Image: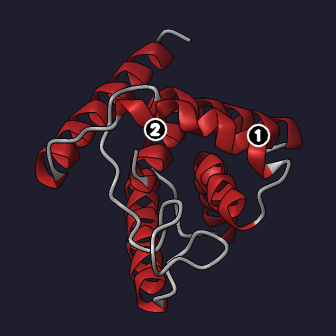
């Protein structure tokens, strides 16, 4: 799934933990739920945008780490991921009814970082192919067979529908807790 989807799903899943006072055990619970929800969300058939800067195997134009030698592709991917993450944070901000305080923004940042940590670790594995990055990468590779292959517009629409359904289910479950 794309970054914004992971952030929104995690925000819905951790909403009950956002009560005051915000404690270390709540932060740890958010982290655990976020990482677990990342893998569960990726188990659902979904769409991902292609990273232009990551080059497969022995393709020409690849540096020793697996990235394209064309740094413009890296900047394009970084810009896309940043906009994607900011969109997810904006939706989560509104969904959780947060305020513009340093504390709420710090909590939102923690939720967002925790939600996308498996993706970050997988990218680091390309650069540094060792533990602990390899653990995340091996767990993350499992979901690649579930990717939506019909195109970006239908894939994005399918993913938005899937995320909305997950959020509605989570909100419905939390009413009974």
Give the total number of marks visible in the rendering. Answer: 2
Name the residue located 37 percent from the left edge and 55 percent from the top edge: 91
Vertical arrangement, residue 169 with respect to residue 119, above or below: above
Q: Name the residue that disc number 1 marks.
A: 135
CA separation in Å, label 2 and label 1: 23 Å
Left or right: 28 with respect to 142? right
Q: Earlier in the sequence, mark 2 or mark 1?
A: 2
Q: Name the residue that disc number 2 marks.
A: 9
Q: Nearer the viewer, mark 2 or mark 1?
A: 1
Quadrant of the frame with the C terminus: top right
Q: Which of 3 and 168 is in front in this view?
A: 3
Name the residue located 28 percent from the left edge and 34 percent from the top edge: 164
- Location of residue 160 (image quadrant): top left
Q: Is mark 2 on a helix, strand or loop?
A: helix
- Location of residue 39 (image quadrant): top right
Q: Nearer the viewer, residue 72 or 2?
A: 72
Quadrant of the frame with the N terminus: top left
Residue 95 image offset from top left, x and y in percent: 40, 47
Q: What element carries label 1?
A: helix
Vertical arrangement, residue 104 with respect to residue 34, above or below: below
Vertical arrangement, residue 84 with respect to residue 70, above or below: above
Residue 56 image offset from top left, x and y in percent: 48, 61
């Amino acid at each position: 799934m794309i970054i914004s989807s992971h952030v929104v799903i995690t925000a819905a899943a951790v909403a009950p933990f956002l009560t005051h006072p915000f404690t270390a055990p709540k932060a740890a619970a958010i982290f655990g739920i976020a990482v677990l929800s990342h893998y569960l969300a990726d188990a659902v058939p979904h769409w991902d945008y292609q990273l232009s800067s990551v080059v497969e195997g022995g393709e020409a134009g690849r540096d020793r780490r697996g990235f394209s030698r064309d740094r413009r592709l890296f900047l394009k991917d970084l810009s896309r991921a940043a906009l994607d993450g900011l969109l997810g944070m904006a939706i989560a901000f509104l969904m959780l009814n947060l305020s513009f305080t340093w504390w709420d923004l710090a909590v939102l940042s923690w939720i967002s970082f925790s939600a996308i940590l498996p993706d970050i670790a997988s990218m680091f594995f390309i650069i540094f192919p060792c533990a602990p990055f390899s653990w995340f990468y091996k767990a993350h590779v499992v979901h690649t067979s579930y990717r939506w292959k019909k195109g970006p517009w239908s894939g994005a629409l399918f993913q938005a529908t899937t995320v909305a359904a997950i959020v509605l289910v989570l909100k419905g479950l939390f009413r009974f807790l």
